Amino acid sequence: MARRVHVALATVGKWRQRFVLLRVDGLLDEPRPGTPRRLSDAAVERVLARTLESQPQAATHWSTRSLAQATGLSQSSISRIWRAFSLRPHRSQAFKLSRDPRAILRKHRMWGNIQPDVKMLRTREDAGKALTQEEETALLKECRESRSRSLFVVVLMALDTCMRYSEVRLLQWSQIDFAARELRVGSSKTEHGDNRVIPISQRLHVVLEFWAGIFPQRKPGHFVFPFEKCGGRGKDKLFGFKGAVAYATEPTQPTGDWKEAWEHAKRRAGAALNPGAKNPKPLVCRFHDLRHTGCTRMLQKGVPFSVAAVIMGWSASTAVRMAKRYSHIGHAARVEAIDKLASATVFDSEGARKWAQSSRAKKASGWAQKWAQPEVGGFEQTN
């Protein structure tokens, strides 16, 4: 019996003794020592029913925080119940109705009737921030110390490839060619961004090779950043745990998000940039600003806008709009272009000097002075 159910002989002996004394009831699990259970079956059932059969007012799915507020239970209790029943509302594959008013009106074919009377707000073209070199250094340093071991690789990839958040999150090993030092983007936000090829920088190539070594059993269809749970070791008074411990890795599923690790990294980076502040503010940086930073630096280094547009995955219309947004960037490159244009011609300094002393130049100068004379009463002053 012990060999058949893969348990020790002592365990089988205990089962036999309890069966002799209490028959079948003796095989049931006895109450375990420790804190008694606080959640009743009715409370668990209520949480499960609300998770699966209802929807919050301002979101497409429940979070542990919102459901805890709605049920009066603690957030950790909601999290334990979800884990016990393998519930992940944020990773649902079901179709979700949009809450965008325009999408709803289009669905019912009503948007076309009122569209001429609707004045859309102007899209902000100045949204976005490019990190300074100091901010990038501080941010990457804190990402390396994050409990999420993948955060540093993710942020570095976003900076060096200008990929979008979803493109990074859903990247698979089959899309990376280490020999050619390039990666191929899969499904993108726009059609022009699908399947575009992006070269891999030297520093990203080194980091990706190290990251690949962590997964020796990886397959082409596995995700580069798989779903996994993160723990911490050690304790820090200001920022909590230090160090990273990853477990329960599922390579066939992409990671959910890096929101918590990302926010903590920005908080630590803000403190590092302002060491003397009593209440340092987090570093102001959205994840999309990493993409904006990479594009800004490409243009500042004189990369042609058409090349940057291909790397960014912009359509033709988007490239025109982005040309206005990034028009202030690359002034040094434009100055260099004009200098190169001038250097391509032969400048006759002696001929220019003779022209300046000629009668034709003097006539031109006199005409310019006459043209610049002030007007009297709105009419030209005449003799």
Image (spheres, rainbow, N blue to C red):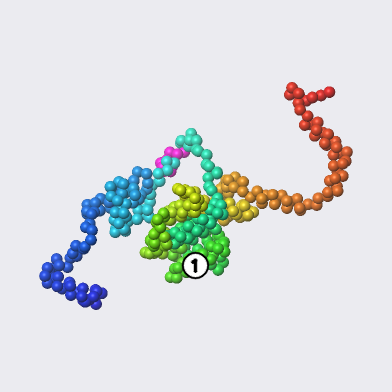
- Residue on which disc 1 sits: 210
User: Is residue 218 a member of the stretch shown in magenta?
Assistant: no
Q: Is residue 113 above or below residue 24?
A: above
| Image location (x, y in percent) of residue 13 | 18, 75
Q: Residue furthest right?
A: 359
Q: Could you tell whether 196 is left or right of 76 in the image?
A: right
- Residue at image location 78% in from the left, 31% down from the top: 371
- Residue at image location 48% in from the left, 34% down from the top: 117
Q: Nearer the viewer, residue 148 or 252?
A: 148
Q: Residue furthest top?
A: 377
| Image location (x, y in percent) of residue 175 | 50, 63
User: Is residue 108 a member of the stretch shown in magenta?
Assistant: yes
At numbered mark 1, what does the secondary structure look like: helix, strand or loop? helix
Position of the C terminus by quadrant: top right
Magenta-colored span: 103-112
Position of the N terminus by quadrant: bottom left
- Residue at image location 51% in from the left, 56% down from the top: 138
Answer whether residue 340 is visible to the viewer in this image: yes
